[in-house]
Amino acid sequence: MNDPVVIRLIGGVEGLEKFPELSAMVGEWVVDYIPEFAVQGERWIWTTPNKAEAKRYTAEQAFAAYHRSINWNGRPDRPITAFHITVEPLE
């Protein structure tokens, strides 16, 4: 079962609406996710409204991406967990 899957942002944590650049991504699919950029104050996630343009993962890779942790001021952080996601088959 290595069929490609994509990650869709389907909602967000309470307070996400205070960040319009992030809340605008709800409903879209992930194109790229580089959590290390969040530490530098840079854009760290890119999305698309077009499912066909989304980054393809295996299910294991999608799970690993969502749980990928970075060091933020000496503490672990996972920026993407500001979103609620679903992992969907590409087709």
Image (cartoon, helix red, strand yellow):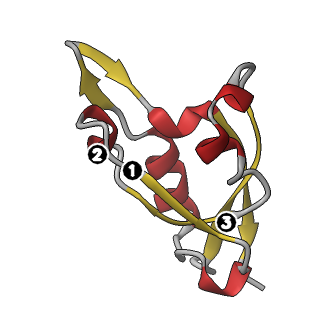
Could you say whether the residue bearing mark 2 is in a helix, strand or loop?
helix
Q: Secondary structure at mark 1?
A: loop
- Dot 2 surroundings within 10 Å: few (below 14), some, or many (20 or more)? some
Whichever of callouts 2 and 3 sits on the residue coming sooner in the sequence is: 3
Q: CA distance from mark 1 to mark 2?
A: 6 Å
Q: Residue at x 44, y 31 (%)?
A: 78
Q: What residue would you read off at disc 3?
A: 29
Residue 25 picture location, percent across and down = 68, 54
Residue placed under numbered mark 1 in the picture: 43
The quarter holding residue 16 reads top right
Q: Position of residue 26 (x, y in %)?
A: 75, 51
Residue located beneath label 2 in the image: 37
Residue nearest the observer in this picture, 9 or 63: 9
Pointers 2 and 3 in contact (CB under 8 A)? Answer: no
Q: Position of residue 80 (x, y in %)?
A: 52, 40
Front-lying residue, 47 or 70: 47
> Which disc, if any, is residue 79?
none
